[in-house]
Every structure is written in C-alpha cells, then in structure tokens.
Amino acid sequence: MPSRKSSNGWSGGVVYAVGALILFVLFRLLKMKKPAIPKPTTGYRPTPLAPSKDVLTFDEIFKWITAQEGPASLKAVPDGKTKDGKQLFSIGIGHQIQPNESRLLTETITEEEALQLFKKDVDTILASMNKVIKVTLNKNQQLALFSLRYNIGVDAFNKSSLLAELNKGNYTGAALKFADWRLSEGKISKGLQLRRERERILFSKPV
C-alpha cells in the first residue's frame, strides 16, 4: 500500500509540472505576439531629412496657409490693431511686420522675398509650438493648430484655453475652442469665423 500512495503522489506531481509548463509556454507565445507599443512623438517636430507620414511637410503647410491668407502681398497692408489701438501691418504671405522690420512698411518685395519670409515664419512657429504642446498630434491636428498659431500669434496661442485643454488630452474640448478666435478689433469677423470653422473641421478629421 505505501508504494501505491507514493506512486500516486509522484504521478500527481508530474501532471502538475506538465500543466505549469504548458501554461508558461502559452503565456510566452501570447506575449511574443503582442505588438510593441511605439513611443509617442510629442508636439511638433521640424521636418526630418527622411520624410515621415506623421510629420508635416513644408509643401503641406504652404498649400494650406496660402489658401487661408490669399495671394502674397508684395506691399505692406493694414492687418488689425493691438489692444491699445496701434495699427499693425503685414506683407508677403500674412507675415506680420515686426518693429525691427520697419523698412518693409515702405518697400516693395519680390515673390522670392515673400517666400523667404514665410519659410522663416514656419521654422520659428514650429520650434515655438514644439515647446508648449505636450500631447501627440496627427498631421491634421498639427496643421490646424499651425494655422491658428500663424494667425493669432505666439502670446495669444500660448495663453489660450485651447492649448490648456489640448495639453490635458481633451482633444474634443480643444476643438471647440477654435471658435474663441473669431474677433477682429472686438467684433466678430465673418472671415475669421469661417477660417476657425475650417481649422476645427481639419483638427477633428482623422488621418
């Protein structure tokens, strides 16, 4: 009798060990098949030397912004006012003339100069946005936000409730905030209202 009990105990141990081994192998196989989660990219990045489907190209930005801003202006044109009533001017593809660019108020620039001003603005804005946007964006979201930032300026964008909601991961809430920026000199501008709606639709459109 003792020998039988010992045999039964040994058999039970073998079954337990084999079962544990099978479970371990299945676990390893399932783990191997589980796709790796890619590390998310954050905010904006300069266009890399190797094209990426997730990064805006200059051509994509140029096509969208020129559609919003219209043809390049080779002479300075009035473009809104500051809060204290000071007249602002832009030139080229919506480039706002800065205090150190007073010569542009009276000069006539070439189309090539307008393009160079635009390229400089693009690089500056992308670098600026990369510092303040803390969430992952697809290309449509990047382009919509770039369009807004290009239009309202650095301070307004950085202090906006839109950016605050975006950085909380509230993409839906951020999309609804585009409409906040439809005023010109304190009054609703139909042109800005339509532009904000185009940007909102683009921001909400899956890639």
Image (spheres, rainbow, N blue to C red):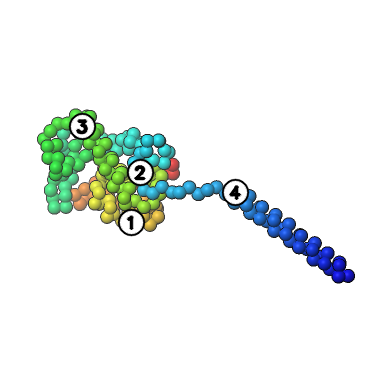
Nearest the viewer among 39 and 133 is 39
Specify the amino acid type for callout 4.
Answer: Met
| First of labels 3, 2 by sequence position | 2
Q: Which residue is mark 3?
A: 113
- Residue at image coords 36%, 52%: 134
* Alpha carbon distance from label 3 to label 2: 25 Å
* Alpha carbon distance from label 2 to label 4: 32 Å
Location of the N terminus (image quadrant):
bottom right
| Tag 3 and tag 4, C-beta contact below 8 Å | no
Q: Position of residue 9 (x, y in %)?
A: 80, 66
Q: Position of residue 189 (x, y in %)?
A: 24, 46
| First of labels 1, 3 by sequence position | 3
| Tag 1 and tag 3, C-beta contact below 8 Å | no
- Residue at image coords 86%, 67%: 3
Name the front one of labels 2 and 1: 2
- Residue at image coords 41%, 47%: 41
| Tag 2 and tag 1, C-beta contact below 8 Å | no
Specify the amino acid type for callout 3.
Answer: Glu
Judge whether residue 24 can be spotted in this image. yes
With respect to residue 177, does 54 lie above or below? above
Nearest the viewer among 36 and 133 is 36
Work out which residue is located at the far right of the displayed protein and give it: 1
Name the front one of labels 2 and 4: 4
* Alpha carbon distance from label 2 to label 1: 20 Å
Name the front one of labels 4 and 1: 4
* Alpha carbon distance from label 3 to label 4: 55 Å
Specify the amino acid type for callout 2.
Answer: Arg
Task: Please give the label number shown on residue 32.
Answer: 4
Q: Which residue is mark 2?
A: 45
Q: Which residue is mark 1?
A: 164
Q: Secondary structure at mark 1?
A: helix
